[in-house]
């Protein structure tokens, strides 16, 4: 089967199905069966909608994390360096383990951990 057309609710040709399924309608597909020469109309509808409880991502304590410290903040720079932090001159960030970041209270300086 080959999908020829996909329509969103509100587009021309979707009125009846939009009335039937309302806000639960996601899209309408027109599929063509080459063998039987038939057009098949399919709809995608929402059947369940719940708030998803996700656990925050746990960062391993020994993971090396990048943090950004202002250039003129000499106290924090010395503190990070004394804790074993390394300067990454390419990225222009300090790198140290997550455990050390937590111990120093620098979680707000972490750069986009993935």
Image (cartoon, rainbow, N blue to C red):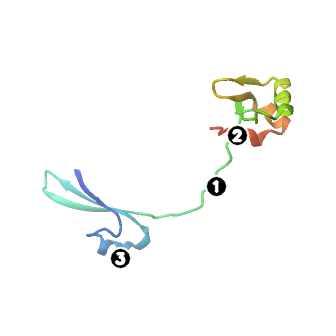
The residue under label 2 is 58
Looking at the image, the residue that sits furthest to the front is 72
- Label 2: few (<14), some or many (≥20) within 10 Å? few
Q: Give the position of the C terminus as an image quadrant.
A: top right
Residue 35 percent across, percent down from the top left: 13, 51
**Above or below, comparing residue 36 to residue 12 in the picture:** above
Q: Is residue 26 left or right of residue 113?
A: left
Query: Are dots 1 and 3 in contact, CB under 8 Å?
Result: no
Vertical side of 56 occupied by 91: above or below: above
For disc 3, the neighbor class at 10 Å (few under 14, some 14 to 19, many from 20) is few
In the rendered structure, find residue 53 and report the number of the disc placed on it. 1
Dot 1 falls on a residue whose secondary structure is loop
Residue 47 image position (x, y, % from top left): 46, 64
As drawn, 26 above or below 87 = below
Whichever of labels 1 and 3 marks the residue nearer the N terminus, that label is 3
Q: Residue 22 sits in which quadrant?
A: bottom left
Tell me what residue is drawn at x 86 percent, y 29 percent. Answer: 79
From this viewpoint, is residue 98 visible? yes
Q: Are marks 2 and 3 in contact (CB under 8 Å)?
A: no
Q: Nearer the viewer, residue 56 or 12?
A: 12
Q: Which residue is mark 3?
A: 19
SS class, disc 3 = helix
Q: Quick one: 20 or 70, which is closer to the camera?
A: 70
* Mark drawn on residue 77: none
Task: Give the spatial CA distance, label 2 vs label 3.
Answer: 45 Å
Q: Residue at x 63, y 24 (%)?
A: 90
Q: CA distance from mark 1 to mark 2?
A: 15 Å
Cα gap from disc 1 to disc 3, whole angstroms: 32 Å
* Vertical comparison of 34 with 46: above or below: above
């Amino acid at each position: 089967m080959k999908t020829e057309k996909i329509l969103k609710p509100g587009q021309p040709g979707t009125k009846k199905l939009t009335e039937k399924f309302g806000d639960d309608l996601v899209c309408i597909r027109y599929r063509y069966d080459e063998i039987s020469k038939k057009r098949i109309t399919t709809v995608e509808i929402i059947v369940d909608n719940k708030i998803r409880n996700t656990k925050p991502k746990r960062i391993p304590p020994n993971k090396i994390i990048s943090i950004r410290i202002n250039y003129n903040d000499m106290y924090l720079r010395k503190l990070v360096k004394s804790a074993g932090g390394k300067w990454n001159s390419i990225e222009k960030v300090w790198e140290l383990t997550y455990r050390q970041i937590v111990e120093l209270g620098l979680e707000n300086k972490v750069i986009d951990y993935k």
